[in-house]
Amino acid sequence: MDPPRAGVHYPRSVGEFQAWFRTDADCLDYLEWLRWPSGLVCPGCGHNGGWRLGDGRFMCSGCGDRTSVTAGTIFDRTRTPLTVWFTACWLLATGKDGISALSLKRMLAIGSYQTAWAMLHRLRSVLVRPGRDRLAGRVEVDETYIGGEEPELPGGRAPGKKGLTGIAVEIREPKGLGRCRMAPLADASAASLHSFVTDHVEPGATVSTDGWMGYHGLAKLGYVHDRRSQRAARARGDDPAKLLPAVHRVASLAKRWLLGTHQGSVGAAHMGGYLNEFVFRFNRRNSRSRGMRFYRVLELAVAHDPVRYQGLIASRRPRAVPPVPPRARGRPPSLERAPANRPWRTPRVAGSG
Ligand SMILES: [Zn+2]
């Protein structure tokens, strides 16, 4: 498809968003258009073509299998109405700082915190496009502790609860920042740092790091390694924290976002999802249209395999108290609304006032 056009393929404003997606059926049709722009492509046999059944599902004309628009996507078997999903997606994608699970629960009348939490994590899990480009040119790389169950207290760090995070940021000429990548690291060993760099930075790039020995050997991996020693900086009287100003800047933006929007209540086990969201928004910070970001999230969501609740909570570190799976009462009401006929003009029923 040609590049998506504002006002045709994605809404330009919240007003357009509300006008386009008034019903759950509108949302389902948009997902169908995004997923199968030239008609049903059977997830089972790959055949292109089929027909719509009376119950809204589709039958493949190749193998006869039945499927639905949401089957095999992150919306597979969801009990949450699509109007609620779309609004959550709009808030996540277009808001300057995204949205917390608590705010989402309250705003959309979602019955349980776990449902809101799982919706946002499902959306976060699609934000990394498989096979996306690696960073190139001049890239700063560093590792730092981010997150934790509680805000940083003066003198009272809780390193066990924080997640070690790798950060890579492109440096633009003559100045400014390009794209960034962030990912949780198991530790600061050479093995972890080398695989972070090879996963996220194109060989041939100039990689600036501090003097940490975990970065030794990058030249052998095909990078131009620019080592900046903290000790030498201190000896010159320079601030060692400013050796790598780009990663320093991105790390503090990420920390501020986690503390502000999420009150710092982000455990190391789910840090990867939050980092995906931060990087998605950071790398599109100059995008002219926020509606385009909404389109990108849904485009990724219909191309992504289902994310099961048990998979979301199956964290790398076991939690003392596992989250309770959402129950039926957590099913939020659809955001479909019939015209309300100006209740402020409606005469009051006796006894109600
Ligand atoms: Zn088929």
Image (tube, rainbow, N blue to C red):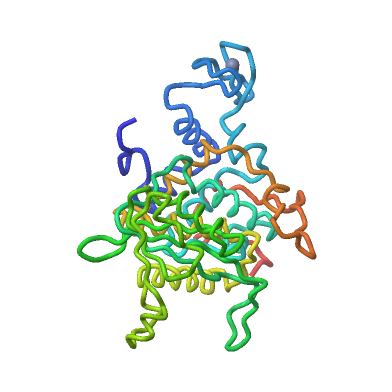
Asked if 263 appears above or below 129 in the picture, the reply is below
Which is nearer the eye, 158 or 328?
Answer: 158
For the question of whether residue 151 can be seen, the reply is yes
Give the percent coordinates (x, y) of residue 266: 61, 67
Instruction: Please identify the quarter of the rendering in which residue 151 is found.
Output: bottom right
Give the percent coordinates (x, y) of residue 124: 54, 52
Q: Which part of the image, by quadrant, shows the C terminus?
A: bottom right
Classify residue 10 as left or right of residue 351: left
Classify residue 345 as left or right of residue 65: left
Residue at 54% across / 19% down in the picture? 46
Classify residue 218 as left or right of residue 151: left
Residue lying farthest to the right in this orientation? 320
> In the image, ligand 1 is in what quadrant?
top right
Give the percent coordinates (x, y) of residue 321: 79, 64
Residue lying farthest to the left in this orientation? 174
Asked if 339 appears above or below 140 in the picture, the reply is above
Classify residue 85 as left or right of residue 220: right
Which is nearer the eye, 259 or 270?
Answer: 270
Asked if 13 appears above or below 149 in the picture, the reply is above
Which is nearer the eye, 143 or 26?
Answer: 143
For the question of whether residue 342 can be seen, the reply is no
Give the percent coordinates (x, y) of residue 16: 38, 48
Residue at 67% across / 54% down in the picture? 115
